[in-house]
Each structure stands twice: as structure tokens, then as C-alpha cells.
Amino acid sequence: MTETIEWNNLGFGFIPTDYNVRCTYADGKWGELRTHSDMQINLNIAAAVLHYAQESFEGLKAFRGKDGKVRIFRVDENAKRMQDSCKGIEMPILPVDTFREAVLQAVKLNERFIPPYGSSASLYIRPVLFATTPLVGVKPAVDYEFIVFVSPVGPYFKGGFQATPFMLSRKYDRAAPLGTGMLKVGGNYAAGMKATVTAHDNGYSSMFYLDPKEKKYIDECGAANFFAIKGNTYVTPQSSSILPSITNRSLSELAESLGMTVERRPIAIDELSEFDEAGACGTAAVISPIARIDDVDNNKSYIFSPDGSPGRVCTLLYNKLRAIQRGEEPDTFGWTMEVTL
Ligand SMILES: *Cc1c(COP(=O)(O)O)cnc(C)c1O
């Protein structure tokens, strides 16, 4: 099977692998981890996840390094974020150790799917936690399943590291529950599907979301956070309706270590015209440099890269983070966990 994977031609999608790792919550407690080679689940037609989207997911990656070692990037941060999602939608808290162990097992068991060093691909890890209790009334379930599966993936955007146009319109909202913050839970993403399809249909990489209350400040774009470079400053929005991106936090720390100032504050739309560079960031793409943002409601464009070439600081941050993930540079931040195969 792996013989047939062309690592450098891999897109960002799902490829079946050998094993997944599962854990069941019942009678008020989490059980033991189990290994499955079967990719199906047996679910009651009234399972709460199907109706009320009581579900959370995470996304992280493992990389084959220059030294042959396999590293997982910031797994504990994803574990903690899933706990926050659990709290937000009344699901039982999954212990960080259980999350980490399940991820480790899933990576080890599927070692033959970890792309080689030097290819543009990596191993994407997708933990999901969902409610299985049969219910018809809106209330938290009492049974849950946690599953970790993996899939080798190529670059998120086909063109590679290149700046692309993004769309901005006040007509779209992801309906992130105000006050609770944006969580990595199913309902938020279903609410954003129409926006994503609309952006793609119009030739854009992604839709920009504004703050849902005033529609005045930049929130984030698609499934990625927004950041901009203004002189020697890394600016990123402060908002309760954006997903706390681990990549964004890592890039902020990198920027600081390079002597830049980091500002986390509300960013009004008009300020877009003052930025030297702009990017979308997340696990999937690390950084997607933004060529321009078209405010289609007002026929206004904010241009960062007329020719599509990534800016100097975006390129620097992108290369730094990738080098740490692939063991080309020492990880002085303690972000990576080596996998003993
Ligand atoms: C996953 C995600 C991000 C990026 O988070 P990372 O931890 O950097 O992968 C940003 N926004 C949304 C809405 C997301 O789902």
C-alpha cells in the first residue's frame, strides 16, 4: 500500500491507514485504550452527536525529521484544548495522558504511513470525541467515544507556499456561541460551510470572519487564525470568537525570539490597509500568506502581495517553524515530542 503513495503528490485529504485507537466513556469513567483495524463505528440512530453535534475534534501532525526521528508537535496543547471544548459543550473531560497516549499509539501503529523526510507531506492526526447515548431531548449524553486516526497529508494548498486571495463579507457568520469562545466542536464548522463554499466558488482560498457582534473587527479566516506584520510587529486579533490556534501562539513566540514585538488586540477592518504582510496560520498549512483581502460588500481590496510572493517575515517564520518540526534546528522551546518507534 505505502509503495503506491507518491509522497510529493499527496494532497490534503483522508487516506485509510492500518489502525485507529479508541477509548469509551461509560458509567461515569473513561475505559482502557483499544486498537482497532476496522474503520467503521456502530452508532445508534438516536446518538446525541447526530442531532445536537455534541462533538469535538483536534488536528495535529507528526513529522519525520532530518535525523530519521519522528516528532509530534505540541500534543499536550491539543489535549488541553480538547478539554476546553469538552467543558464548553458539557462532555466529560478526557485526561491529557489518555489523549497523548492514544496519539502516540496511533502514530506508532501506522509508522509506515509517516511520510519520509524531504517530502512535502506529513502525518495528520485527527482525534475525535463524540456523544453516543441515544437521546431525543436536548441534554448532555452520558456515553462517549474518543477515537484517534491518522492520515498522511500533503500541503493544504496545492500551489505550496504562495500568497492567495481571501474573501471578506459581513453576510457570513459561523455563529460561534458568544461569550463561550470559538471551540473546536462540530456545530461551529457546519455553520461555516456555506461561507467556505461561497469563498471557493468565487475564487478565494477562504472566507474572513468579522467579530459576530459589531462586524467591525477581524476575527479569523476559515479554519485558520489571522496575523499581520506591521514594521517589526506581529499583530494578531484579540477576540472571544476565534479559535485559540496553537500555530499562532508558536509563531508569536518565534517572532518574539527574533526580536519582534507581539501585539494581541482588536484589529479594526480599516487597519488592514496599514499592514506590510498578512497571513493565515494553522496546523494544516503552518502559514498561508495572504495576497489580498477583498471586502466584497464594499468593493474594497486590501493588497499585501500583488504578485503572490510570500513576504519576508512570513517566509522567515514559516521556515523557522518547519525547521523545528522537522528536527533541522534545535527545539529550544520544548514544542516537539520524539516518538520511540
Ligand atoms: C484548528 C483551527 C485553527 C488553527 O489552530 P491550530 O491549533 O494552529 O491548528 C484556527 N481556526 C480554526 C477555526 C480552527 O479550527
Image (spheres, rainbow, N blue to C red):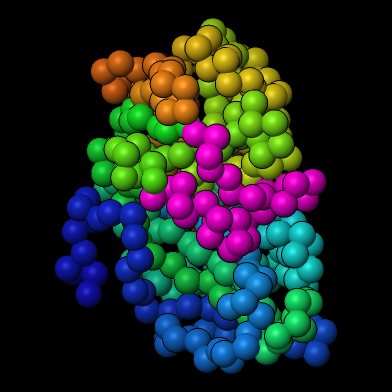
Residue 143 against residue 198 in the figure, above or below: below
Q: Quadrant of residue 219?
A: top right
- Examine the rendering and report whether any part of residue 77 can be seen: no
* As drawn, 230 above or below 160: above
In the rendered view, would you say 14 is above or below 277? below
Camera-nearest residue between 88 and 83: 88
Using the rendered view, name the quadrant where residue 204 is placed. Answer: top left
Which residue is found at the position 46% from the left and 39% from the top? Answer: 207
Asked if the magenta segment contains residue 192, the reply would be yes
* Residue 52 in picture, x, y percent from top left: 66, 72
Residue lying at 53% horizontally and 17% vertically, measured from the top left: 272
Identify which residue is drawn at 37% across, 79% down.
Answer: 18
Q: Is residue 157 magenta?
A: no
Residue 178 visible somewhere in the drawing: yes
The number of discs equals 0
Instruction: Report the side of 246 relative to 306 (left or right).
Output: right
Q: Residue at x 45, y 52 (%)?
A: 194
- Residue 188's x, y, as percent? 60, 56
Residue range of the region highlighted in magenta in the rendering: 169-197
When the figure is inspected, residue 162 is found, relative to residue 24, above or below; the finding is above
User: In which image quadrant can residue 264 be found?
Assistant: top right
Q: In the figure, is residue 173 to the left or right of 178?
A: left
User: Looking at the picture, how far across and down is residue 262, in whole percent?
Assistant: 65, 20
Q: Residue furthest right?
A: 28
Query: For this view, does 5 lie left or right of residue 266?
Result: left
The quarter in which the N terminus is drawn is bottom left
Residue 54 image position (x, y, % from top left): 67, 71
Q: Nearer the viewer, residue 248 or 87?
A: 87
